[in-house]
Image: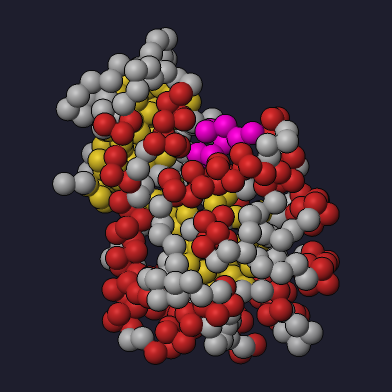
Amino acid sequence: MTNKYLFCRYALLGEDLELKQNVNLEIDQSGKIIEISYDNITKNLEILPDGQSSLLIPGFINSHVHIGDSFAKELGFNKDLGDIVAPPFGLKHKLLRLTSEDTKIKGIKNAVLEMLSNGITFFIDFREGGVEGINLLKKALSDSSINYLILGRFMDESEIDSVFDLADGVGLSSYKQINSSNRKFVLSAKQKFKKIIACHCAENIRNSNLINEMFNDNLVDIIIHGTKFIKNDLEKVMKKSKALILCPRCNGYFGIGFPPISEIMSLKIPISLGTDNLMVNNTDLFEEIRYFYRISRILCSYNKELQLTSKDLLKMITINAAKNFNLEKKFGSISKGKFADLFLIDLCDPNLFSSKVDSNNIYNLITQRAKSENIIKTYIKGEIVFERR
């Protein structure tokens, strides 16, 4: 097999998502970028018709998703968070138990197609159902090219080692899952398998004792939500070098409030974003960053220095996401040595028209105007995995 070559009029390259033009990528047989050539931009972008003004963007990373409940879209509309997702008797968990494997697999496969059409090339799934749930997801994705991590959830102590072994780590629904009888087994498995532990925390209620216990045990690497965190909690996130994943649209869906964005921004915590339960939320990360931007404008209005740039928003679903899951050597940007996971949008589409497009406001156009419908093709390892007809 020979190397592949990909040319694009414009692209966002490297760790700082720099806009370049006349970009050529050389991709080796493993799907990694081995050479990049480009020209610098010295004037406004020239927007030409018929696909001549396409833009390459690094593939998005969905940092938190529950893909297994995709078959149950909107079956919990207008219900409260606990009524839907609280294990083991929340509506989602009842439906997961009652629904056939074939239906759940069909939901997962369709969710993957949706993500690829949204420019998502990597997702992190928080897998319910113990060993059985992990195996179900692997079966559903056996013929899929999308990248993913599975963070499994043990049902009882007997499954701890098996979940660590089969999955890429553990995704706790709450730190209440860690108790005096299983803590030593979880610690032992974490040391043995050297895998990450993520935990939903302070999504709806701030339990200070549970939060302090989580930080003191130092088992958790990645915190999901933190919607009710106060500044002291966030300072511990920084001090303990924990990753923080936010899911603002899902928080809004359930009416539980906004993440503490002003405190997060003032502490410069490198967050990434996820779309959470597919049962209640779609996988569109364009929508996620727009929602996040709008609530940040409200919550940070008192301090202009905390205002987010459009690059900041894009990094939350590319660069930051890769770093938060220790994936940055292979994913997260269009860079030499990383996989050619990226997507192509057409800057000539009507919703992206502007009388002036330059190397500054191009980022604003992408974050505030681009839609999944603008995506022409999505690539994973340099191969087309989605093409809009």
| Figure quadrant of residue 316 | top right
Residue at x-position 62% and y-position 48%:
271
Name of the residue lying farthest toward the front: 78
Residue plotted at (79% across, 64% down): 215
Q: Is residue 250 visible?
A: yes
Image coordinates of residue 371 in percent, x first then y, are: 35, 43
> For the image shown, how many numbered marks are present on the structure?
0
Q: Position of residue 323 (x, y in %)?
A: 59, 47
Residue 314 falls inside the magenta stretch: yes
User: Start and end of the magenta stretch?
Assistant: 307-318
User: Nearest the camera: 23 or 175?
Assistant: 175
- Residue in the picture at 29% in, 59% down: 113
Quadrant location, the N terminus: top left
Q: Position of residue 59 (x, y in %)?
A: 40, 44
Image coords of residue 326 (percent x, y): 58, 51
In terms of depth relative to the viewer, which is nearer, 198 or 246? Answer: 246
Residue furthest out toward the top: 42
Residue drawn where x is 71% and y is 43% of the image:
262
- In the image, residue 241 sits, relative to residue 335, either above or below, namely below
Indicate left or right for 348 with 241 as reference. left
Indicate whether residue 211 is drawn in magenta.
no
Q: Is residue 12 above or below residue 238?
A: above
Q: Is residue 217 visible?
A: no
Left or right side of 337 for 173: right
Q: How is the image coloured?
A: secondary structure
